[in-house]
Image (cartoon, rainbow, N blue to C red):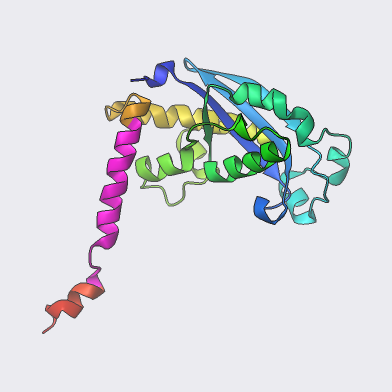
Amino acid sequence: MQAFANCRFVVVDVETTGTSHGRGDRVTEVAAVVVEQGAITDGFQTLVNPRRPIPWRVTALTGISDAMVAHAPPFADVAADLARVLADRTFVAHNAPFDWGFLGMEFARAGLPEALQGTPLCTVRLARRLLAHLPRRNLDSVAMHYGVHIESRHRALGDARATALVLKGLLHDLERQGVDSMDALQEWMARRAVVRKRRTAMPRWADDRGLGEGA
C-alpha cells in the first residue's frame, strides 16, 4: 500500500480557448506543480500558442490575449518537457476530466499519446465526498474552506498552486478518517459511490405519498 506521504503527485491546471477540446478548443497555458513528501514545487509552466484566436470572453476571464501567446511555443514544442514532469506521478486537477481531456488531445496531436498514464485524481470529486456541507465545491469555495489564497486566479500556475494546497488539506482530512493510502482511497471512494447511488435510488417524499401516505 502506497501511503500518501510516499506518493508522488503532480497537480495540473490548463487554460484554454474554450470548454470543448472535441470542438477544436486548444490549450493556451499549462502548469504542473509537484507535491512530494509534503513539499510543493513548481514543475512546469508556460503559455502556449493555440494556433487559433482566443475569444474575448476567455481573455476577459483569464487575461490571456492573442498578443500574449503570439510568440509562445505551440504545445508540440513543450510536450516532451511536460511529459517528463508528469511521468511516474499521480495526475491531480480540480475537475480532472477537463484538464486530462485537453492534455490528452494535445499530447495526441504532438505524437505523445502515452504521456498520460494511470487514473487521474480529481479534487472536485474528493471535495464532493469530504466537504458535502459546502454549498459549492469549485476551487474558490474549497480554497476558502482550507484558508488557501489563490494568486492569479484563472491563470494556470496560480490555480495549480492553490489546488496543490487544497490537495494537502483533503488528504489530511482523509487521514483523520483512517484513509491514508491510495489503495485505501480507492476503496473509500468506491464505498461512497455505492452509498450515494443507494440514496439517489431511494423514493423521494413525493413518491412516498404516492404509495399511500395520505390514503
Where residue 131 appears, as percent x and y from the top left, is: 38, 42
Residue at 47%, 46% (x, y): give it.
137
Which quarter of the rendering shows the C terminus?
bottom left
Residue in the foreground of this view, choosing between 148 and 20 = 20
Determine whether 120 is above or below 26 in the image. Answer: above
**Relative to 36, residue 174 above or below:** below
Residue 56 position within the rendered picture, expressed as x and y whole percent measured from the top left = 79, 55
Q: Nearer the viewer, residue 28 or 148?
A: 28
Q: Is residue 200 left or right of residue 100?
A: left
> What residue is rendered at 33% in x and 24% in y?
180
Does the rendering let one see residue 101?
yes
Left or right, residue 208 beside residue 169 = left
Residue at 73% across, 37% down: 29
Q: Tell me: 24 left or right of 93.
A: right
Quadrant for residue 31, please give it.
Answer: top right
Q: Is residue 191 magenta?
A: yes
Give the percent coordinates (x, y) of residue 63. 77, 44
Range drawn in magenta: 185-205
Looking at the image, is 5 positioned above or below residue 106? above
Residue 95 in view: no
Residue at x 26% of width, y 57% of height: 199
Q: Which of 66 and 20 is in front in this view?
A: 20
Q: Total of numbered circles in the picture?
A: 0
Residue 189 location, quadrant: top left
